[in-house]
Amino acid sequence: MKKSFFALALGTFGLGISEFVMMGILPYMAADFHVGIAEAGHLISAYALGVCVGAPVVALFARTWRLKNILYLLMGIYSVSAALMAICPLPEEGSRWQFVMAMIIRFMQGTPHGAFFGVGSIVCDRISKDGKAAFAIAIMCSGMTFANLIGNPLCTFITSTLSWRYVFCFTTLWGLGTLFCISRWVPNLDALPDHGVRGEFRFMKHLAPWLVFGCTLFGNSGVFCWYSYISPTMTDLALVPESMMTFIMVLAGAGMVLGNFIGGKLSDRFGPGHTGRGIVIVLFISLISTHFAAHIAWCAIPLMVINVACLFAVSSPQQILFVRHSKGGELMGGAMVQIAFNFGNAVGAWAGGLPIVESEPTSYHYPALIGAGMVVMAVVCYTWFCRRYEKKI
């Protein structure tokens, strides 16, 4: 493995903690900020919306920069925002502005996320061997999956024994360490050709990137409808002991790691479109099963592993599809998959919270059902894309 891929994976590891750790520590954040679980879910949505805003802003204003310099900027923002979250004040009873401040910081934390994946995908595509770009991107994305295997369970444990503030202290230091590794190992590649502001968006006139955007948006919305509330679903509905949540988050992370590498391998072999379509069909079946079996722990836990494995199995196929179908605007195209991913995150967290009544644990059955309906739309988008743009297997 090239050291440059490893440096990029360190970055996605940190981003993975920032994004996904909320699923494990949401009840603690809700208690400290004196809000309900569903309202605390806005901290997830705020991060996701930051991704949606940050990626196009970076694509516009840093499009003439060398790729390595853009990575410096993004990890700098990541480190500063993590430090701000670590010192965010807590409210007294009846006060609200502290929670609003936390949402603003979470928004700031999300702004470098999509652009980092976009720039990283272009770097991987440039330095990987022919025909291995999807797997190279999977290596970069593996940082995020290992964050869910190791980092987030550890952070959940730290939060349960100490405080969530230590989580953000850790991510601050991680960001600084990643900056050092990028400076040492990522090659100083030339900037992308500057086609002007209009040129950066010209690829959007075509149908293909919008179909991939739909695949990503609907697929991820479907998963996050359910996964945003995984902690209360397991403890309140499936009656899993709270002490087991760290182990459950480790299992989720293992599923993500496995799914990510499987998706990369299958994509290089069968094509990213065909691979993505097959995976979201499996995801639909798994979410429907989750709706009916979420109250049975020995069913809910394996289904969780399948769901999150599917979530990351489509990651590298979607990333490479955007890069290939955004000629002249590769920086924006590479970021669009994360815009779609995190907009789907925001929509999913919101939609999944609608049927939840905290006094009724059975209401946690329904986020998975809503998610399955969204995944149907992802299947439609993938099928349309494959018929028009991808060769038959």
Image (tube, grey):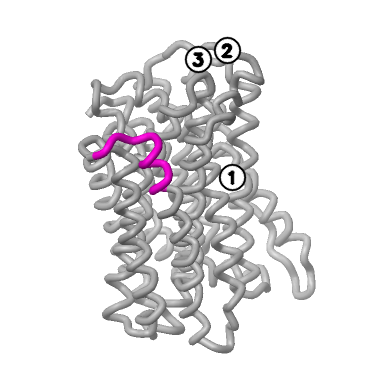
Whether residue 315 is visible to the viewer of this picture, yes or no, is: yes
Q: Amino acid at mark 1?
A: Gln
Q: Residue at x 55, y 26 (%)?
A: 203
Residue on which the image places disc 2: 194
Residue on which the image places disc 1: 109
**Residue at 24% of width from left, 52% of height from top?**
258
Bin the neighbour count of mark 2 within 10 Å (Cα to Cα): few under 14, some 14-19, many 20 and up. Answer: few
Dot 1 alpha-carbon crowd within 10 angstroms: few under 14, some 14 to 19, many 20 or more: many
The answer to whether residue 149 is seen in the rendering is no
Q: Is residue 88 above or below residue 196?
A: below
Mark seen at residue 192: 3
Label 3 sits on what residue type? Leu
User: Dot 2: what SS?
Assistant: loop
- Residue shown at the point (50%, 51%) measured from the top left: 19
Residue 359, relative to residue 243: is it above or below? below
Kindly report which numbered mark, 3 or 1, lies closer to the viewer in this rendering: 3
Identify which residue, 57 or 263, lies in the foreground: 263
Q: Say whether disc 3 or disc 1 marks the residue closer to the N-terminus.
A: 1
In the image, residue 388 lies in the stretch drawn in magenta: yes
Query: In x, y percent, where is residue 243?
Result: 36, 77
Q: Label 2 amino acid? A: Asp
Residues under labels 2 and 3: Cα distance? 6 Å
The segment highlighted magenta reads 382-392
- Percent from the top left, x then y, of residue 30? 61, 70
Residue 312 magenta-highlighted:
no
- Name the magenta segment's main secondary structure: helix
- Residue 177 picture location, percent across and down: 42, 34
